[in-house]
Amino acid sequence: MMKNILFTAMFLMIFVSLNIFSQTYIIDSQLSKMQWEGKKVIGKHNGTINIKNGTVNVKGANIVGNFEIDMKSIVITDIKDQESNAKLKAHFDSDEFFSTHKYPSSNFVITKAEAITGEKGENYKITGKLTIKKITNEISFPAKITFDATTFNASANFMIDRTKWDIKYGSGSFFDDLGDKAISNEIPYKIKLVGTVK
């Protein structure tokens, strides 16, 4: 059994190195997930957001693809009081944040993947275009990616400056005298992508 696994892994590595291996994976929205965190002077909030769909194509050492994020699915997990939770959720949905009534989806397009050796096991540097509220900016971050003939797995931590997507509410960069009501411009995300061949 172990010999078969090793043989398969070596066979796949040879195919990738020779740019022969080619596979398209469909993102599994049930197994894939995103987590977010919003920080302010006197505390923070965190939660999840759903990935709707997407595809990843691996051809040799090249990885490209895209996936869609359901902005209406934002969940706040740290606030247990239902009324307070609903109030913050409505705030996130409003024009002061993500305007989900106008822009129900965001999108990330992977444009380049470079092999690296990361401190936490990351083996690729991903570069791509993130679109929120129809505003597109390029971002790059390290990721850990594995794949075989049937399954694609990726995990990464990355951070964005929300003001680049016109989300300026509570930002000390644009408003004075906010005091302890100031909200950090940086939003950290954790993402897990699982793709399978259909």
Image (tube, rainbow, N blue to C red):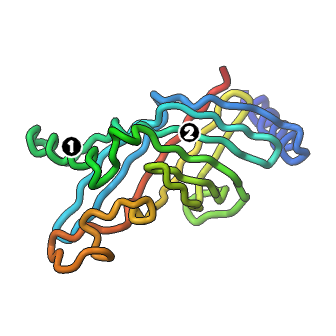
One can see residue 141 in this view: no
Task: Determine which residue is flagged by label 1.
Answer: 90
Indicate the amino acid at tag 2: Phe
Question: Residue shown at 69%/27% (left/top)?
Answer: 150
- Above or below — where is 65 with respect to 26? below
Q: Position of residue 179 (x, y in %)?
A: 15, 77
Indicate the amino acid at tag 1: Ala
Labels 1, 2: front one: 1
Of residue 194 and residue 11, the one placed in the foreground of this image is 194
The dot on residue 67 is 2
Where on the picture, by quarter, is residue 127?
bottom right
Q: Position of residue 20 (x, y in %)?
A: 89, 38
The dot on residue 49 is none
**What secondary structure is marked by label 1?**
helix
- Above or below — where is 86 with respect to 31? below
- Above or below — where is 118 with respect to 68? below
Question: Residue shown at 73%/58% (left/top)?
Answer: 115
Kindly check if marks 1 and 2 are in contact, taking CB atoms under 8 A apart as contact: no
